[in-house]
Image: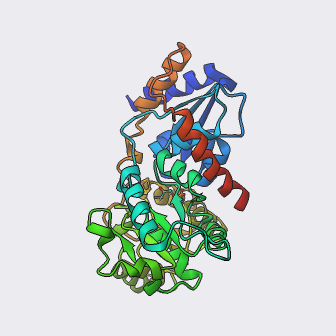
């Protein structure tokens, strides 16, 4: 039963004691979150993974790219476990290393492959944290960097100071929303579609003229939010504050009152005065938890149906109980390991990010 599973997790966790660190992303269900030592956004959890080098085992309740990042940043002696190996991220899967290398070769032909007279690189690659370790390693090898939704602007400032243009993958929306807020026009941001010859531009020179080349990836959860939903919320609750995640479309971000990472969304709701009405454009488990934690405020999801991240939801308590009980018996199941070469190069790009935005 559910109660029995909760007890098995609590008991195993107690017996493992300081040997265990459980990290939980904000989108995890409550039955998982209550067991996490740290709960946060992807940026915060990447840092938390480095904070307990004494813990033998890190159990990451989130999705695959987050566990890979924890493995790269933690010590070689620590194991990292993802309770369900099928907890991936459909957006991260929208860019693979072969596609990015093909894009890079094409851009090198179009934009050149040597720094110009001012020492600026023709293209600086920037990958969103929501990407495989192989793409982070690509950025490490090619003078690029990683960003998350909580530091994308600072990272893009770093990249624009080093190159003529940025290749941003895999999320077009985070790239577009962030660069536009920095004054880059839409005309300077062509899309790169990995499934079309030469990225799909009718004129390859569009990429030479670009400031920001946006990979054609998206989050299927955040792409559900619409301007119509924002308008309906405003009609139903005059004075409502609408806050959304930057993986939403530019039109939704324009219609909202605030945009930011999951940590930003949590802060906004915590800091809102009693009686505030807040409509949120992000994953439903987080929104429902915030609503329950703030009964003096009205907090609801912009999407009237439901908006879960189905892969985050794959971390069921039964998997958590199973991995913890195996750890107790000395078996590391569902271990996530990034090979040494990939980890070394990915760490270069991650550490650049941590220097730009500690
Ligand atoms: P955060 O970095 O804001 O936690 O977002 C991660 C994510 O997957 C959002 O969909
Ligand atoms: Fe990936 Fe979207 Fe789920 Fe975030 S909400 S983990 S971007 S599929």
Give whichever of 178, 145 is nearer the camera: 145
Residue 229 rendering spot, x and y as whole percentages: 36, 77
Answer with left or right where residue 300 lies relative to residue 76. Answer: left
Quadrant in the picture for the C terminus: bottom right
Which residue occupies 68% across, 28% down? 55
Q: Is residue 202 visible?
A: yes
Quadrant in the picture for the N terminus: top left
Outermost top residue: 329
Which residue occupies 65% across, 36% down? 74
Protein image colouring? rainbow
Residue 102 rendering spot, x and y as whole percentages: 37, 58
Which residue occupies 37% across, 81% down? 227
Residue 64 rendering spot, x and y as whole percentages: 45, 42
Answer with left or right where residue 255 lies relative to residue 154. Answer: left
Residue 98 rendering spot, x and y as whole percentages: 37, 51
Outermost left residue: 196
Which residue occupies 42% across, 39% down? 315
Give whichever of 137, 302 is nearer the camera: 137
Q: Is residue 172 visible?
A: no
Q: How many marks?
A: 0
The picture quadrant where one finds residue 221 is bottom left
Answer with left or right where residue 154 lies relative to residue 97. Answer: right
């Amino acid at each position: 039963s559910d109660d029995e599973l909760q007890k098995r997790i609590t008991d195993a966790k107690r017996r493992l004691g300081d040997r265990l660190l459980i990290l939980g992303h904000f989108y995890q269900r409550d039955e998982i979150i209550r067991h996490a030592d740290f709960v946060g956004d992807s940026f915060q959890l990447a840092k938390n993974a480095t904070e307990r080098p004494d813990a033998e085992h890190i159990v990451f309740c989130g999705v695959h790219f987050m566990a890979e990042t924890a493995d790269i940043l933690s010590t070689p002696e620590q194991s990292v476990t993802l309770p369900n190996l099928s907890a991936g991220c459909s957006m991260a899967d929208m860019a693979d290393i072969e596609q990015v290398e093909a894009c890079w070769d094409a851009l090198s032909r179009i934009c050149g492959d040597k720094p110009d007279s001012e020492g600026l690189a023709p293209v600086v690659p920037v990958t969103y944290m929501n990407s495989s370790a192989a793409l982070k390693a690509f950025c490490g090898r090619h003078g690029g960097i990683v960003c998350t939704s909580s530091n994308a602007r600072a990272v893009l400032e770093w990249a624009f100071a080093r190159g003529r243009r940025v290749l941003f993958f895999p999320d077009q929306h985070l790239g577009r929303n962030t660069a536009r807020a920095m004054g880059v026009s839409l005309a300077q941001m062509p899309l790169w579609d990995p499934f079309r010859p030469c990225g799909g531009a009718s004129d390859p020179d569009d990429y030479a003229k670009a400031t920001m080349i946006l990979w054609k990836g998206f989050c299927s959860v955040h792409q559900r939010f619409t301007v119509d939903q924002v308008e309906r919320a405003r009609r139903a609750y005059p004075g409502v504050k609408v806050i959304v995640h930057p993986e939403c479309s530019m039109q939704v971000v324009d219609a909202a009152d605030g945009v930011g990472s999951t940590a930003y969304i949590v802060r906004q709701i915590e800091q809102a005065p009693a009686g505030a009405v807040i409509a949120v454009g992000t994953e439903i488990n987080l929104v429902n938890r915030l609503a329950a934690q703030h009964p003096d405020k009205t907090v609801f999801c912009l999407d009237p149906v439901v908006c879960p991240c189905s892969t985050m939801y794959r971390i069921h308590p039964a998997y958590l109980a199973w991995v913890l009980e195996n750890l107790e018996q000395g078996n590391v199941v569902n271990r996530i390991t990034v090979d040494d070469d990939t980890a070394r190069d990915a760490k270069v790009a991650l550490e650049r990010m941590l220097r730009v935005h500690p």
